[in-house]
Image (tube, coloured by chain):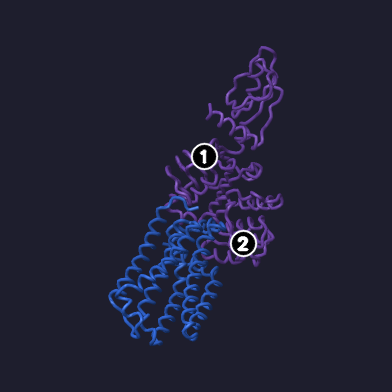
């Protein structure tokens, strides 16, 4: 069995005003990857390439052991896909959609579909055009989950949902994670959603993957050090400092390679460490993006 | 080729166009009735009605099955299913044709039957067949443009072009010596000129649909 559910190697795609460059991405089977980027960063283009809907100009893409886009039909048999810009047929009912999809997917689980409909408070007889946005997202998620996919690809599924619907969708996703063989790629610009369910995080900005790691590793290695500098003491040079903020004598150093020993190094260099702050995923993402953009413009 | 999947997509398109199909059959039956029993003024009026119903069905199905799928963002749902671009294209071409052609066959069959049973208009036989195939060409042009351009504007332009072409072709065919001579006669005729014209139309249909497959199979961005 291929241990990588998704593998991008040197993938590039050029448009007139945007290009995806040299994307390397690995998603091991059974993992849940949060794919974070600002609007227009390249998340949807990457996902469309993954689904075979857009052909890469260069590089190779393998999904569930299939080469994309050539073997997209075979690969999509095992993929559940929900995207923010995907709509179901408004004139048809949810029941019609379930009956339409049932013969297509050999692993379609009708009992699970009905159970999800109850849990999501969806009426199968109701036409899709009569559903709220939240209910439509849940309906699309139901159709993706009931096919029992090996890979679930969710492109900004929680965008535009009210807080209650968002929690319901996320909790159902977490329930779906109980299956260890199922791999999930979850893209969002909402870091809170991604933080809740992911065990791996990838940041993308301006068409480039800027960082990718385990969620815990991200949270462990990113810190903000609040220093107090006596007169005549310079800001200590520490490894992995991506941003120096604060004021002259009260600098705040953001590092992506934090180690506890840094505190004693600072003290030895004459700088008092007032506090070592952990960072949220959102703060890490923003600091990461800013530092990469500065590197590019430097 | 995943035939089961293609079949499923065609059935889906049929399902969503079922009202348009039903209305077209009703409209077609009424138009044929007017042609058959409306006397001389009814003949002309009925023919105009008939052509209108045929053109409307082809426009509605192509717009509904192809352009609206993109505009209403249901294409992402369709393309998330286990299909390739070629299978999608196949399902759209066959789906549109399988909605349109049965209706077209009934209408053309009815019109030809009327010509056969009415001696005063026997001479129209070849002209009617040539124009009927021309309507099929217009429909295929619209299907091809809709699939390749994915644009409502271009598809409407193709529809207008097809309709204008129908008038131009009708005028030209009626003035071709091989057709004109017998057109107003009272005998059913078929000659080499008619065969060449119909064969050219069929070749054009093959070119349009073959070209659509060729372009679609080379597309790099599908959504």
Q: Is residue B183 above or below residue B162?
A: below
Of badges 1 and 2, the one in the foreground is 1
- Numbered disc total: 2
Circle 1/circle 2 CB separation < 8 Å: no
Pointer 2 local density, CA inside 10 Å: few below 14, some 14–19, many at least 20: many
Q: CA distance from mark 1 to mark 2?
A: 37 Å
Say which colour chain A has. Answer: purple
Q: Say the numbered circle drawn on residue A113.
A: 2
Q: Is residue A99 above or below residue A167?
A: below
Look at 66% across and 66% down and name the residue there.
A126
Q: Is residue B2 visible?
A: no
Pointer 1 local density, CA inside 10 Å: few below 14, some 14–19, many at least 20: many
Element at label 1 = loop
Q: Is residue B179 visible?
A: yes
Element at label 2 = helix
Q: State the residue lying farthest toward the top.
A: A232
Look at 34% across and 83% down and name the residue there.
B185
**Percent position of residue A285, x then y:** 61, 36
Earlier residue among tags 1 and 2: 2
**Percent position of residue B99, x then y:** 48, 71
Judging from the image, mark 1 belongs to the subunit labelled A
Judging from the image, mark 2 belongs to the subunit labelled A
Name the residue that disc number 1 marks. A207
**Percent position of residue B171, x then y:** 38, 71
Chain with colour blue in the figure: B
């Amino acid at each position: 069995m291929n241990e990588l559910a998704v593998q991008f190697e040197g993938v590039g795609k050029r448009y007139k005003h945007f290009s995806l460059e040299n994307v390397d991405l690995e998603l091991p089977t059974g993992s849940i990857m949060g794919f974070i980027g600002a609007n227009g960063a390249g998340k949807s283009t990457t996902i469309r390439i993954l689904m075979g809907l857009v052909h890469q100009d260069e590089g190779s893409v393998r999904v569930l052991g299939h080469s994309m886009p050539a073997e997209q039909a075979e690969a999509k048999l095992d993929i559940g896909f929900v995207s923010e810009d995907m709509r179901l047929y408004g004139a048809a009912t949810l029941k019609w959609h379930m009956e339409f999809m049932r013969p297509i997917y050999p692993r379609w689980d009708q009992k699970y579909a009905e159970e999800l409909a109850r849990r999501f408070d969806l009426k199968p007889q109701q036409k899709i055009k009569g559903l709220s946005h939240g209910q439509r997202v849940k309906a699309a998620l139901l159709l993706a989950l009931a096919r029992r996919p090996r890979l679930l690809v969710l492109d900004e599924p929680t965008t535009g949902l009210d807080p209650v619907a968002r929690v319901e969708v996320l909790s159902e996703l977490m329930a779906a994670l109980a299956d260890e063989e199922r791999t999930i790629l979850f893209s969002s610009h909402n870091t809170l959603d991604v933080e809740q369910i992911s065990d791996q995080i990838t940041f993308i900005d301006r068409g480039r993957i800027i960082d990718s790691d385990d969620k815990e590793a991200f949270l462990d290695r990113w810190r903000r050090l609040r220093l107090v500098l006596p007169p005549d003491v310079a800001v200590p040079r520490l490894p992995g400092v991506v941003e120096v903020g604060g004021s002259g004598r009260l600098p705040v150093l953001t590092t992506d390679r934090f180690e506890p020993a840094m505190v004693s190094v600072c003290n030895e260099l004459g700088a008092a460490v007032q506090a070592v702050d952990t960072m949220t995923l959102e703060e890490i993402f923003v600091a990461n993006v800013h530092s990469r953009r500065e590197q590019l413009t430097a | 080729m995943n035939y089961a999947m293609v079949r499923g997509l065609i059935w889906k398109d049929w399902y969503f166009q079922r009202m348009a199909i039903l209305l077209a059959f009703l409209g077609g039956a009424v138009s044929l009735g007017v042609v058959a029993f409306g006397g001389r003024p009814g003949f002309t009026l009925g023919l105009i009605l008939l052509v209108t119903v045929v053109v409307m069905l082809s426009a509605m199905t192509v717009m509904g099955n192809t352009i609206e799928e993109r505009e209403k963002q249901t294409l992402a749902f369709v393309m998330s299913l286990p299909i390739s671009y070629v299978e999608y294209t196949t399902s759209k071409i066959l789906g549109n044709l399988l909605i349109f052609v049965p209706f077209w066959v009934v209408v053309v069959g009815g019109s030809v039957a009327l010509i056969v049973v009415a001696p005063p208009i026997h001479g129209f036989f070849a002209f009617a067949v040539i124009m009927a195939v021309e309507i099929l060409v217009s429909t295929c042009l619209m299907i091809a443009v809709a699939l390749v351009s994915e644009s409502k504007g271009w598809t409407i332009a193709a529809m207008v072009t097809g309709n204008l072409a129908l008038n131009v072709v009708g005028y030209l065919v009626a003035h071709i010596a091989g057709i004109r001579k017998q057109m107003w006669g009272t005998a059913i005729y078929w000659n080499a000129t008619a065969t060449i014209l119909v064969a050219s139309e069929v070749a054009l249909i093959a070119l349009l649909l073959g070209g659509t497959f060729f372009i679609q199979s080379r597309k790099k961005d599908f959504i």
